[in-house]
Image (spheres, helix red, strand yellow):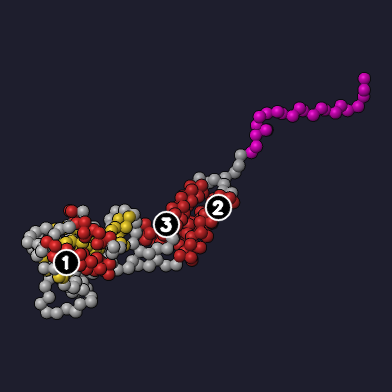
């Protein structure tokens, strides 16, 4: 038997499952979450500020809901794409911050790249330009249609409602610049028979669009009146008018036609005929 103090044996280590489980990750502190939200919000505001105006103008220029005359927006489709991606990325990061998720550096890169891309695109594209006036194209189309009617008049000694003749003539003039549902509208002739005067009111129920020309032919075929449809400043359909508010009309009679009445190239004179009262709204 040995004498002396007895050294106690160490207790066996516990092998519980809890000891093997790593400690739970602590949520981000409220101050850091607030700072992250402010930074993300600032970058999002900068990005939207750069692309919002050109993106909205480009989207409105598609004419998805009504005919329009679009602005000239360089890189317009790119701005619309950047705006959509910025909205998606802002929503994603906002949900992550509000749910106290930890955002790694790679999670923040897409928003920064979008802001940089928005700045570069805006620098390259420059400012959007307002749409050019449709008046020169419409006046040219009216004159071309009147010339075609006069050339065909001697064959029948009357103005005939020849839709093919007018369609072929207007196809050589070009496009109107008006857009509806993403497609540029062509020039079209809308024939009106047995007319006593020029068509001075848009026929909205007939599906007429800006860029359409009303060709109203009298019952005896001795006269034809040509007017054109455009959009006013509010985007509403109206007859093409002069700065004084009168409808611009070409009247063909027995194989000859007048110059467009009261257009900017023809001085006004007392007694000039107009089928309707003046209207002060300007035309595009």
Q: Residue furthest top?
A: 1
**Rendered location of residue 282, percent (x, y):** 23, 69
The numbered disc on residue 108 is 2
Residue at numbered disc 1: 150
Any part of residue 8 in sight: yes
Residue at figure coordinates x 53%, y 56% from the top left: 113
Closer to the observer: label 2 or label 3?
3
Range of residues picked out in magenta: 1-23
Residue identifier under label 3: 77
Please state if 16 lies on the left or on the right of 211 as rendered.
right
What element does badge 3 sit on?
helix
Report which quarter residue 169 is drawn in.
bottom left
Where disc 2 sits, the SS reads helix
Q: Main secondary structure of the magenta part?
A: loop
Asked if residue 12 is among those painted magenta in the image, a careful observer would answer yes
Residue 186 as seen in the image, left or right of residue 53: left
């Amino acid at each position: 038997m040995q004498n002396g103090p007895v050294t106690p044996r160490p207790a066996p280590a516990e092998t519980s499952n809890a000891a093997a489980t790593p400690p739970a990750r602590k949520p981000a502190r409220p101050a850091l979450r607030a700072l992250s939200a402010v930074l993300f919000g600032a970058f999002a505001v900068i990005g939207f500020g750069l692309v919002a105006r050109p993106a909205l103008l480009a989207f409105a220029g598609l004419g998805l809901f009504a005919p329009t005359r679009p602005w000239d927006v360089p890189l317009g489709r790119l701005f619309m794409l950047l705006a959509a991606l910025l909205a998606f990325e802002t929503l994603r990061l906002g949900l992550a911050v509000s749910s106290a998720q930890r955002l790694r550096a790679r999670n923040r890169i897409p928003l920064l790249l979008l802001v940089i891309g928005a700045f570069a695109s805006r620098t390259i594209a420059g400012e959007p330009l307002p749409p050019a006036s449709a008046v020169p194209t419409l006046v040219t189309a009216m004159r071309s249609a009147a010339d075609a009617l006069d050339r065909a008049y001697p064959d029948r000694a009357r103005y005939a409602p020849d839709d093919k003749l007018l369609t072929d003539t207007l196809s050589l003039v070009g496009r109107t610049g008006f857009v509806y549902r993403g497609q540029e509208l062509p020039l079209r002739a809308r024939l009106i028979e047995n007319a006593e005067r020029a068509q001075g009111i848009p026929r909205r129920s007939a599906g007429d669009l800006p860029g359409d020309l009303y060709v109203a032919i009298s019952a005896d075929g001795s006269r034809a009146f040509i007017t054109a449809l455009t959009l006013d400043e509010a985007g509403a359909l109206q007859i093409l008018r002069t700065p004084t508010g009168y409808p611009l009309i070409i009247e063909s009679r027995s194989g000859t036609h007048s110059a467009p009445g009261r257009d900017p190239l023809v001085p006004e004179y007392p007694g000039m005929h107009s089928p309707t009262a003046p209207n002060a709204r300007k035309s595009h």
